Each structure stands twice: as C-alpha cells, then as structure tokens.
Image: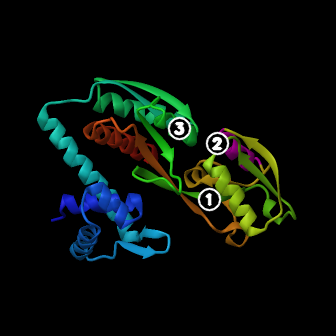
Amino acid sequence: MLDLELLRTFVMVSRTGELKKAAQKVHRSQGAVSMQMKRLEELTGNQLMERGNRGIRLTEAGETLLRYSEDMISLNSAALSALSGKDVSGQLSFGIPTDYAQHFLRFFMPVLAQELPNLDAKIVCARSRNLRQQIEEGKLDVAIVADELNASDETLLWSERLIWSAPTCANLEEQSVLPVAVYEDNCIVRDLLLDALRKASIPYRIVFSSPILENIATAVEEGFAISLLPESLLSTHSVRQLPSGVLGSHRLLKINMIHRPEIEASTLNRVSDCFRQASDKQQQ
C-alpha cells in the first residue's frame, strides 16, 4: 500500500526541486524527508529522482508516480469533502492563458458546471506572466499558467512537448537564413524560442509575429515560417517536426495551477480535478 503521507512529501519535493524546501513545506526535517523518499523508492521498486547541481529531477518512473500521487491526494480530499457534506460555492475568479481559452471554454466550463454546480465562476484570459501578477495582486483566485524556472509550490496539471515545427509543403530549413514566426508580448514560449536559436547559432529572421497561437500555427502551415509549437498541434495542422540536425532540442512545457493563499485546500483540490478532467477530455 502506498502511504498518502509519503506521496504528499514526494509531490512537494517534485514541486520545489529541493529536499530542504520540501521539508519546510511539510514541516519535517530534511533528513526525515530524505528517509521518506528512500522508503517510497523501496515500496515502488524504482528510482524516482536524480540529484544534480540544479536540484532534484524526476526520473521517468518518478513522473509516472507524480501523476498518480496527485490524483490519489486529490481523490482523498474530495472524499473527505463529500463526507463532510460541504460543497464548493460562492464566486471564484479563474485566469486562463490566452492560447488555451477556447479549449477550456469548450471543455472546462461543462466539467465545472457538472462537478461544482453551486460555484459562480468568472473567467479572465491573459498571458501566463500577467496572470501570475494578477494572482499576486489578489485580482484573481486561481489561474492556469506555464511553468517558469524559478517557480515553486505550484500544482502540475499536465505537460506537453514544444516541437520545432515546419510546413509540410516547403523545406524552409534549407534556406541560408531561417524564416521564423514568433509570439508577441511577454511570452514564455517566445523566450524559449529565441534562446534556442541563439544557442544553436543559426541565422534567422522574424517574418511573422502574433500574440495568438493559432496565427503562429497557420503561418507555419501555409509555408511562411518555422516555429516552436505545442506537440498537440502537429496532429491537427499541416506541419511536421524539423529534422533533429537543424533544431533538435525540444522543451517540455508544464502547465501549473496557482492560487491566492487564502483559497481553501479542499476548493483547490476540487478545481484542479476539474482542470484535469477537462484536459483529459480535450485529448480524447
């Protein structure tokens, strides 16, 4: 049997990337947390994490356990909430990244209405970094945001690879100067795209820019540019993955849930369940 307390600590270690920070969050000593992780690895028969100069990184087995751990912890909280006879009610404001707005209006809102019928939801769409600021300023209750390197204590909802993509109708990578489509505004993916191009020392020129993901994907699809796109778009657009010899380093885009400190844990667990259900339905 997997111990929920071990799983709670494991989730916190994965979020913070450090035993010391995780120990502070779960109110245990660093040594106790280390022993818990060793015990969990013994129970599962797998190495769950690797320690390096940049902190702790989950192995493939660790990533798998993380998904199940969050589900089990969430289900535990939902069960206790149901037995207490209390349902989530009142007004709650949600922040949704602009690029995911249509999907979540189509998938998230029906799930939310079914699972939390007494909740009065308000939806705000903006860039992830703008949503972070609104959470800090107390203007939003809960938000979905793209993961940042220095972010911690956030709930992972799902993750997706970012793929260097090119049109199927043209071999743009053969041009001496690579035509690139980029995101406008203060965008995390834009930063990743430009940083990768600089590190690869590939000559490029920006031929298209837009604050809307669908516009970027269309520019690639129509043979106008290459870009860094979420992997899910490769199956719905006429685009292909660039050869690894051109730009082969892909990034994992993690989508997290953040919130105001005052929001109750039971409410957060129910809401995060709705987010995950919506994501699962979208991928079906």
**Label 3 with label 2: CB-CB less than 8 Å:** no
Q: Secondary structure at mark 3?
A: helix
The disc, 3 or 2, on the residue closer to the chain's N-terminal end is 3
Left or right, 116 with respect to 93, comes to left
Residue 254, placed above or below residue 41: above
The disc, 1 or 3, on the residue closer to the chain's N-terminal end is 3
Query: Image point 64% across, 42% down: which residue?
Result: 213
Query: Image point 72% across, 67% down: which residue?
Result: 199
| Number of marks present in the image shown | 3
- Tell me which amino acid carries mark 1: Ile
Of 51 and 218, which appears nearest the observer? Answer: 51
Q: To which residue does mark 1 refer?
A: 163
Left or right, 48 with respect to 246, comes to left
Q: Secondary structure at mark 1?
A: strand
The quarter in which the N terminus is drawn is bottom left
Residue 80, placed above or below residue 94: below
**Of labels 3 and 2, the one closer to you:** 3
Q: To which residue does mark 3 refer?
A: 133
Of 254 and 248, which appears nearest the observer? Answer: 254
- What segment carries the magenta color? 212-222
Percent across and percent down for residue 163 are 62, 59
Percent across and percent down for residue 203 are 83, 63
Q: Is residue 22 shown to the viewer in this render?
A: yes
Of 107 and 145, which appears nearest the observer? Answer: 145
The disc, 2 or 1, on the residue closer to the chain's N-terminal end is 1
Marks 1 and 3, how far apart at CA: 28 Å
Query: Image point 38% across, 64% down: which residue?
Result: 63
Q: To which residue does mark 2 refer?
A: 213
Magenta part, dominant SS: helix
**Of labels 1 and 3, the one closer to you:** 3
Of 34 and 61, which appears nearest the observer? Answer: 34
